[in-house]
Amino acid sequence: MNALPTEAEALVSRIEGMLAQAEELLASGGSDEAAYALRETERRYLPDTLKAYLDVPPARRDETAGMMLVEQLRLLERATVQRLGVLAESAQIALAANGAFLTERFGPLDALPEAPATELVDPSTAPPATLVRRLFERLEAQAGPEPGAILERAGEQLAAAFPAIASVRRAGLLGRGAVEAVALDVPRRDDLLRYMLARTRQGGVEATVTRFLRGIKNKTLAVDVDEWTRGLIEDLSAYAERERGAHETLTRLFRERR
């Protein structure tokens, strides 16, 4: 990434951000042209475009070569925006159709009785996604709005639930002080995302996400804590679904704290 022109880096970051948004839509297995184009952009079009530029000897990567790369990335960006819009529209149409079906099948919402209060989760039968969501609900309820408390609770609970991928950095010579940063390296299908919460000099909390592709660190993005949490819940749920050991640790933790 450091070898790319500044404008090209910004374009790559925007394209990767849109492809990350498309992952959930693509998980449904759509096989139309838009879904295919988005998959190929991540798998082939974007990497091949960058490789073509980086294959040019450094001494020949002049302004003309940089302009060619930027133009090609702009094309990819606009095509990705268009395909993502088509895919999102298809998902919205499917959602509306499902709502119409449910209303026809069960009647309007106002005609049905209120649901009883949510029952306690049985960790032995609950799916990993449910356990992960409940873990974050507990963390948020116990921590409250104070940034330092959020870090402390995250350091304690996330490290206990996901010890294989979580790391905690504490202040003090012996590492026994307040939590300064919490990081989770969550492996996904083709890459790894490092979700990090870190204390700022002003006493707040900064949330970042760093992508590692084939072990190589890509750009780090600063995001708001809510967006960070939503992404982490989704990726941890998928991780716990794949990794039996992670699922067992999460289940055991809920059994001990019931």
Image (tube, grey):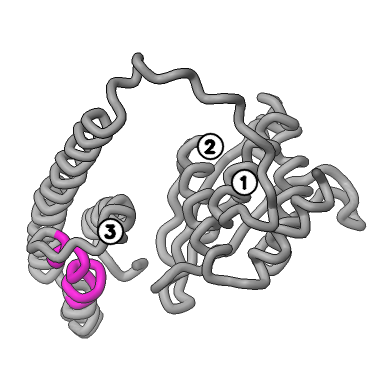
For this rendering, which residue is in front, 99 or 194? Answer: 99
Q: Position of residue 115 (x, y in %)?
A: 51, 24
208 up-or-down from 102: above or below: below
Marked residue nearer the N-terminal end (3 or 2): 3
Closer to the camera: disc 1 or disc 3? 3
The quadrant holding residue 150 is: top right
What's the residue at 70%, 26% (across, down)? 144
Which residue does the numbered mark 2 point to in the structure image? 225
For this rendering, which residue is in front, 2 or 254? Answer: 254
Q: Is residue 81 magenta?
A: no
243 displayed left or right of 64: right
The quadrant holding residue 252 is: bottom right
Q: Amino acid at mark 1?
A: Leu
Q: Amino acid at mark 2?
A: Val
What's the residue at 88%, 50% (across, down)? 172
Question: For the magenta stretch, what is the residue range?
Answer: 35-48
Which residue does the numbered mark 1 point to in the structure image? 197
Q: Amino acid at mark 3?
A: Ser
Which mark is on residue 28? 3
Q: Position of residue 148 (x, y in %)?
A: 74, 33
Label 1, label 2: how many angstroms apart (C-alpha)? 8 Å
112 up-or-down from 122: above or below: above
